[in-house]
Image (cartoon, helix red, strand yellow):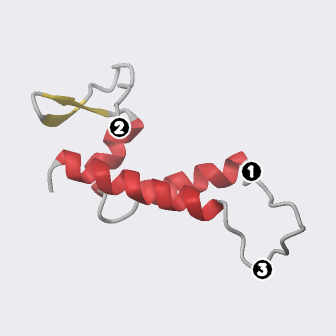
Amino acid sequence: MSANDNILVASLVLFAALNLAGHHGGEREHEREREPAPQEVTEMIDEALTFPAAGDDLTMYISGRFTERDGRIVQLPADAAPATPVL
C-alpha cells in the first residue's frame, strides 16, 4: 500500500469512529443525544489511528513525527518541530 492509500484508510477509519460516536443505541427519541466528551473523542481518534491497516509509519506521520519528502515518508530529527501533515 502506498502512503496515500494508508492515509485514505486511516481517514475512513477516523470518519467511522467519529460517526459512531454520534449514535447511542437504545436512546429514546425525546431524550437529548449526549455529545461525546473531549477525552472520548481523543480515545476514538487514538483507536482509529492504531487500526492495523494504518500501520505504525502512518500513525507517526499523522502525529507529526514523520513528513513526506519527494514522495517518501521520512522521520524528522528528534529536535525538529512536528510537521503539520495535510490529510
The answer to whether marks 3 and 1 mark residues whose Cβ atoms lie closer than 8 Å is: no
Is 45 in front, or is 18? 18
Q: Residue furthest right?
A: 30
Q: Residues within 10 Å of mark 3 (few under 14, many from 20)?
A: few
Q: Label 1, label 2: how many angstroms apart (C-alpha)? A: 24 Å
Task: Spot the residue most to the left.
Answer: 70
Foreground: disc 3 or disc 2: 3
Contact? badges 3 and 2 (CB < 8 Å): no
Q: Residue at x 20, y 31 (%)?
A: 68
Q: Residue at x 59, y 65 (%)?
A: 20
Spot the residue most to the front.
Answer: 29
Q: Amino acid at mark 2?
A: Leu
Which comes before the other along the chain, label 1 or label 2? 1
Front position in the image: 1 or 64: 1
The residue beneath circle 1 is 37
Horizontal side of residue 58 vs 24, given as left or right: left
Query: What label does residue 66 carry, if any?
Result: none
Q: Position of residue 3 (x, y in %)?
A: 19, 46
Percent x, y for residue 85? 34, 31
Q: For mark 2, what is the residue?
A: 87
Q: Secondary structure at mark 1?
A: loop
Q: Nearer the viewer, mark 1 or mark 2?
A: 2
Total marks in image: 3
What's the CA distance linking mark 3 and mark 2?
A: 34 Å
Q: Secondary structure at mark 3?
A: loop
Eyeballing the image, is 31 above or below 64? below
On the picture, is 22 further left or further right than 60? right
Q: Which residue is mark 3?
A: 26
Q: Amino acid at mark 1?
A: Ala
Q: Nearer the viewer, mark 3 or mark 1?
A: 3
> x%, y% of residue 53?
29, 63
Q: Secondary structure at mark 2?
A: loop
